Image: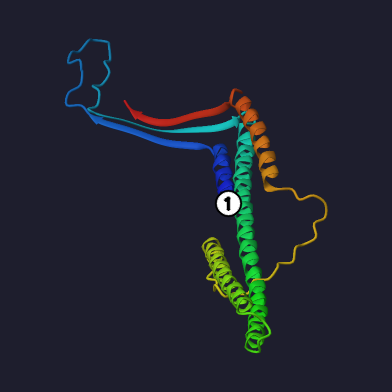
Amino acid sequence: FLSEAADNKISLINKQWIPQITANGQASYQSDVTSLNIKIPGLDLPAPLSKDQYKYYLEANQLVFDGLLTSAQKKSAKANAQVEIQKTEVELYKLKERVMQIYFAALLFKEQLVLTDLILKDLNELDNKTEASYKAGVVLENQVLQVKAEIITAEQRKEELRSEAQKWISQLCILTGIPISPDIQLEMPQMPLMAGSVKRPEFALFDSQQALSSVAFSLNKKQAIPKILLFGQLGYANP
């Protein structure tokens, strides 16, 4: 969209070289006109002026030399478009960063949920063994109660983790616009191998802004250069 807007602006700039032709006209009717109602021997007096008076004419203007202003204006349009494109890239990069941060937060709580389920499974098995040992008189009741307290703590922790995971998944839905089930199984994404350093879009934005400043300076200089135009007029009038 931004590139298309820049192309449209450049197209308008190029139209400055198209000859500008305007048509003008004016007509009037005089209720009375000045006349000489006398005769002078040997002298032909002009005929009375017509009560109808009109004039029609065409004007044409053609730009011949603009001091390279058009070229500077087109460069400015392209530079402005490039700055806007880079601004969009920066915002998209920030959005992607935020999505990844939220995704990994949700993934972290999901992984902790899996770990807590494993702990609960072990605690429940231990609880069954401890109950049997207690009935057999091998362990004290206090040991049974201690295992049950650990199970309660683990279950509370599981609910907290589930709530946190759902909160981050909800934020992920809002940012991406994609409906995601709270029970979805998240996977660790494969991170691509980076060759060399990654250039962030902020650097490209800075470069494009520097280029725009240089183009703007050149444009201001071109605007001070005198322009040459051809002008012509053709018309007909009465009187």
Tell which of 7 and 139 is nearer to you.
Answer: 139
Tell which of 74 and 143 is nearer to you.
Answer: 143
Q: Tell me residue 72's x, y (percent).
A: 63, 34
Q: At 65% from the left edge and 29% from the top edge, which residue is drawn?
A: 218
Q: Which residue is mark 1?
A: 4
Q: At 55% from the left edge and 44% from the top edge, which residue is drawn?
A: 9
> Quadrant of the image for the C terminus?
top left
Height in image: 85 above or below 181? above
In the image, 47: left or right of 151? Answer: left
Q: How many marks?
A: 1
Q: Tell me residue 16's x, y (percent).
A: 55, 37
Q: Tell me residue 233's x, y (percent).
A: 46, 29
Tell which of 10 and 214 is nearer to you.
Answer: 214
Res 106 → quadrant: bottom right
Bin the neighbour count of mark 1 within 10 Å (Cα to Cα): few under 14, some 14-19, many 20 and up.
few
Q: At 63% from the left edge and 48% from the top edge, which residue is drawn?
A: 90
Height in image: 193 above or below 154? above
Q: Tell me residue 10's x, y (percent).
A: 58, 43
Height in image: 94 above or below 234? below
Task: State the residue lying farthest toward the right.
Answer: 196
Q: At 62% from the left edge and 71% from the top edge, which residue is drawn?
A: 113
Res 95 → quadrant: bottom right
